[in-house]
Image (spheres, rainbow, N blue to C red):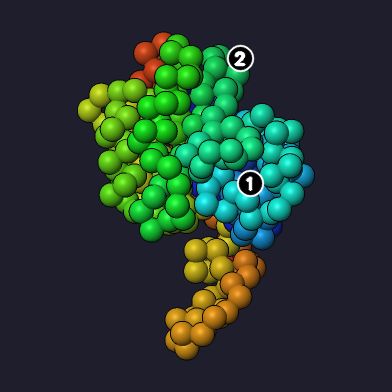
Amino acid sequence: MKILMLGDVNGSPGRRIVKEQLAALKAKHGVEAVVVNGENAAAGNGITVPLAKELLAAGADAITLGDHTWGQKDLAGTIGQLPQLIRPANGGPGQPGKGWCLVTTPLCRFAVVNLLGRVFMPPCDCPFRAADALLAEIPKDVPVFVDFHAEATSEKIALAHYLDGRVTAVVGTHTHVQTSDARILAKGTGFMTDLGMCGPYVSSIGRDLDAVLKKFITGMPNRFEIAEGPATLEGALIEFDAKTKQCTAIEAVRVREPRS
């Protein structure tokens, strides 16, 4: 069975390319299910239920979030409307919503887990201990896919090895830069440090270049709008055995709109 996990959907360009390309990509690779990180879907800062429904209608089966989870104030009161929309499980006690969900397809069911890193990130609970707690809660017979939304590559690699053999795959999100290290670890867990992003690639990680350059050159505060122009869709194609729950193949995926 194959699933596709996509990096951070960044603003309207990211939503556009997902809606335009996802169906063809699923057909081309025989993808059974899709997991999308949507934490930048609303102009780069969080998501709303209507935008989450857009991504689900485009073919997503689960949507993960990250450090911008609560960037849109209405989400706190509405996240419970969509069981497929999950937030980092270790964001802190008392947060609405859930940190994992089950996805059921004609071939099997699997779990999606969302965790937040602590290195160079806002305060949150320990992702390693949170993962242990979730694995005690999730049914033992289902493959588990982890979106680890984190800044530091070292932390992502460490968590992947910590969970090796206990989950089917660990993939990183947040940096918006796709890494070339997709591999299967010693005990059968697929891993990739960062999926990249779905968003405008003539940019600085999705933001308008002029605004970012002005900040770097002058050191003065500036508003970073989502860039315009052609978009890229990036992620990982993961093949796994539903019975053994082990990853059998993982590879990077990228589709780019042409530059005009």
- For the residue pair 248 and 176, the one nearer the viewer reads as 176
The vertical placement of 133 against 222, above or below, is above
The amino acid beneath tag 2 is Pro
Counting residues from the start of the chain, the first of labels 1 and 2 encountered is: 1
The answer to which image quadrant residue 82 occupies is top right
Residue lying at 43% horizontally and 56% vertically, measured from the top left:
121
**Are there few (<14), some (14-19), or many (20+) residues within 10 Å of tag 2?**
few
Determine whether the residue tagged by mark 2 lies in a helix, strand or loop: loop
Residue lying at 39% horizontally and 54% vertically, measured from the top left:
151
Q: Residue 170: x percent and y percent?
A: 39, 35
Please give the label number shown on residue 18. Answer: 1
Q: Is residue 235 visible?
A: no
The answer to which image quadrant residue 172 occupies is top left
Please give the label number shown on residue 137. Answer: none
Q: Residue 188: x percent and y percent?
A: 30, 24
Q: Residue 81: x percent and y percent?
A: 74, 33
Check disc 2 and report the residue beneath it: 106
Q: Is residue 152 visible?
A: yes
Q: Residue 111: x percent and y percent?
A: 51, 24
